[in-house]
Amino acid sequence: MHALLRIFRFTSALSRYYVAVALASILVTAGTIIVPFVLGAATDTAVAAVSGSLEVDAAVRRVILLAGAFLAIDFFSTTIDSLGGYAGDLMSQKMRSILSVRYFDKLLTLPQDYFDRELTGTITSRLNRSIMEVTNFVKNFANSFFTTLLTVIAVLIISFIYSPLLCLLLLIIFPIYMWLTALTSRRWQGLEAQKNEDIDVAGGRFNEVIGQIRVVKSFTRERGELAHFARHYEHAERLTADQSRHWHTMDFLRRMVMAIIFFAIYAIIFLRTARGQFSVGDMVILVQLVGMARRPVMSMSWIVDTTQHAIAGSRDYFEVMELAETERGQRPVISNSATLPGGTAPSQNDDAAPARPLTARALHQNVEEIEPDVPAIRFENVTFGYGTDPDVLRDVSFAIEPGERVAFVSESGGGKTTLTSLLLGLYEPRAGHIELFGSDIAGLPLGQVRAAIGVVFQDPALFFGTIRENIAYGRPDATEEEILDAATRAHADRFIRRFAQGYDTVIGERGLKLSGGQRQRIAVARAMLKAAPVLVLDEATSALDTRSERWVQAGLEDLMKDRTSIIIAHRLSTIASVDRIITLRAGHIDEVGSPAELAESGGIYAELLALQNDNSARAQRHL
Ligand code: ADP
Ligand code: MG
């Protein structure tokens, strides 16, 4: 319940709507409650006319008056009800938007760690389910729960005036009901949480399978995946059966108790009327009022059910919203306001990513004012491991001068990618520190660190959208010339123009419509446009055949000009021209030197070089 109340506090920006809906509910309830009295008065009038104590003409006049009042009241409350319904719809939609957008906002501030752990589909499923359950409750609350509650209260008060005994009987229903509900509630919530877990996990797998459908198909894993997926739902089904059995047993008991109580209530009304303690009009009023209370009391199961779902939903919601592990200095953009960022971009946090990249000059100048001749990048005794895993990097120290090109070489899994992730501030070192142009990145806003670094990954992820949008991803404000220039320098312009739609060609999710080399060149153009002073190429060409590699390589050479570059490449031929090579072994720096020096030294580089030469020699022989 606590979690649910927090949703209201969390969306306090909607308080105008809450007030409007509450006001409408109060007016509608008042209208509903008056109607039985009008009918009661009409009944008494009719009875009086029949028994001769009132003239027929006078009775007719009074009945017409009462009929007019009835019509007016009904008309009024129907109007208010429609307006309230409209406000309720708007409110629940606004609440859905606020909760969804803030959830997304929160997710964007979570550290890389979180995304390493959770499946995207699970995140999506949890978001959709929890918000749907909360807004469903809110909508029902606005449209009926609140009116129901007010009606029951009004009926209790009125029945007290007529007969305290009646009121007491009605009142007794609630503690009994609540007690019976509480008996199963804890178990119900537990089963619900398990069931939701099942559904969210299945949703996670679903997303993965659809996203990697090629792999699924080529390994003919469709049946296996289907069975796996179905198993989660079967499990959820069994949990639901358990949950439902408990629920309906209790519901049966509750209803039986209520049937007995209502039997007693009606018996009292009719007996007292027969004894002349109530008039016929009073009887009409009471029968209607009790009827009004009976319907909601009977539908209380539904209300409790919806409420319990909403409580479970809001718990899940806040579980994510309250994750403490926020990326350093990042906080959600949206404050507690009714307006969403919508078309205009929200104002960024001061320390969040500035959309504008820092140019090499700007960054150098800033730093040169403080201290001349600082290295562009410096790792000092950096030790790091993932989560609770053992260290991947141990006591790693090196410095890279501005404009220098340095390659990292190790066996696969040696920690090269990890090193670049640390530089980007995706993870924090366990010990030691990392400097960028003389500033410890732990003290720099992450947005600035990342703005200073352009990255081309091995498997460049592109978005569903046009080629133009993908190239301009890091700089949505880039001009057409800038985009064309970047594409040309990345040697991508030629193949892009060969598409019928050119730069407007829509590429699929993850860029599936393009070949590896084409995707790679778009990624190079994207980095080119970002124009960051530091460049990281992590296996940027290893997915390519020799011919397209040559194209991409030409683009990369252009990109590396005047930049500090870190290059990680599988194919050692691509790093033969770097200034220095640093090799890693068992998490330590093994050797540092020029390609020529290391080729002679007999270390990892020399070993790998020999292996590759051997391979290419053999390939040549077989040609
Ligand atoms: P390289 O790029 O040199 O091939 P990586 O830096 O990718 O190596 O990986 C170094 C080690 O860290 C490997 O043992 C790998 O299993 C582990 N590793 C990489 N990424 C993660 C991650 N997100 N979570 C846990 N372990 C990881
Ligand atoms: Mg790697």
Image: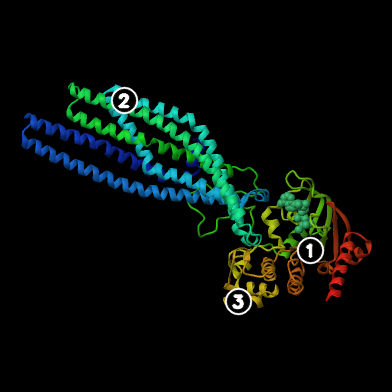
For the residues labelled 2 and 1, the Cα–Cα distance comes to: 81 Å
Amino acid type shown at disc 3: Phe
Q: Is residue 208 left or right of residue 433?
A: left
Secondary structure of residue under mark 1: strand
Q: Nearer the viewer, residue 334 or 272?
A: 272
- Give the residue at x 68% y 48%: 113
For the residues labelled 1 and 3, the Cα–Cα distance comes to: 31 Å
Secondary structure of residue under mark 3: loop
Residue 167: mark: 2
Residue 344 seen in this snapshot: yes
Against 440, is 239 above or below?
above
Local packing at callout 2 (Cα closer than 10 Å; few below 14, some 14-19, many 20+) is some
Name the residue beneath numbered marker 1: 567
Q: Nearer the viewer, residue 339 or 168?
A: 168
Residue 499: mark: 3
For the residues labelled 3 and 2, the Cα–Cα distance comes to: 79 Å
Mark 3 sits near ligand 2, with its Cβ under 8 Å away: no
Amino acid type shown at disc 1: Ile
Q: Nearer the viewer, residue 477 or 538?
A: 538
Provide residue 502's location: percent of width, then percent of height. Answer: 59, 76
Local packing at callout 1 (Cα closer than 10 Å; few below 14, some 14-19, many 20+) is many
Point out the tag, 3 or 2, that comes first from the N-terminus. Answer: 2
Point out the tag, 1 or 3, that comes first from the N-terminus. Answer: 3
Image quadrant in which the C terminus is located: bottom right
Amino acid type shown at disc 2: Cys
Point out the tag, 2 or 1, that comes first from the N-terminus. Answer: 2
Q: Is residue 461 left or right of residue 133?
A: right
Q: Nearer the viewer, residue 67 or 174?
A: 174
Provide residue 592's location: percent of width, then percent of height. Answer: 88, 59
